[in-house]
Image (cartoon, rainbow, N blue to C red):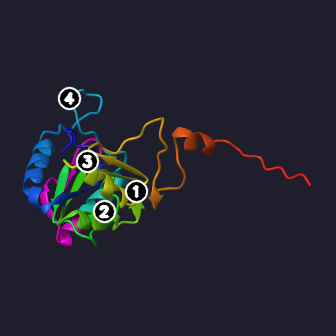
Amino acid sequence: MPDKFVSQTKRFLVASSRLQEFTTLLLEKVKALEIGDPFNPSSTLAPMARADIRDKVDQQVQASIKAGAKPLIGCYSIDGEGYFYAPSILTNVKQGMPAFDEEVFGPVASIIEIKDEADAILQANATRFGLGASIWTEDIKKGEVMLNNIDAGSGFVNAIVSSDVHMPFGGIKASGLGRELGESGIKALCYSKSTWIK
């Protein structure tokens, strides 16, 4: 499991054999988050940008719970100054729930149990989004094979989804068109001129 709980990570697909261990470790990390002013160096979780964004996150979470997801921690808005949402973990997340099917732009981790590699690929691809995927495994070769079968604009083995100025970055499906960064990104900012001389 990565050292940091990265807010951009939305869905965690975890093998049944590691589910309890992973859930316990993630819960420890989430409990350690310090909610507060982003200008305070001790704060590790800042507020959301607007009330409507926080409300949308809560709607997605509550709809997922109503559909059968289990709230492990958080899953509520925090009253007071700033648009804070409690750092949250949902377990028993399945297809048909907003926490599975949609992008939740807030501090909410959705844990999805998988049986094996084939199930992992099936569940990973069961979304209309495809920005990035990250596979964590002790078997690097197996991770590479799995990554080749996952529909995502960027793929990582034993590293979180990130970008680098030297490599093109962008999604597929409903996660956007085109690429930024790298040679592809530079070319996207250029106009090509077609000339035809007979």
**Which residue is denoted by mark 4 in the rendering?**
42
Task: Please report the residue visible at 16 percent of the width from the left and 60 percent of the height from the top.
Answer: 15
**Which residue is denoted by mark 2 in the rendering?**
124
Q: Amino acid at mark 2?
A: Ala
Magenta segment = 62-86
Q: Secondary structure at mark 1?
A: loop
The spot of residue 112 in percent (x, y) is: 20, 62
- Residue 106 appears anywhere in the view: no
The spot of residue 120 in percent (x, y) is: 25, 63
Residue 60, picture quadrant: bottom left
Question: Closer to us: mark 3 or mark 1?
Answer: 3
CB under 8 Å between discs 3 and 2: no
Question: Closer to us: mark 2 or mark 4?
Answer: 2
* Cα–Cα gap, marks 2 and 4: 34 Å
Residue 179 falls left or right of residue 24: right
Outermost residue, front side: 141
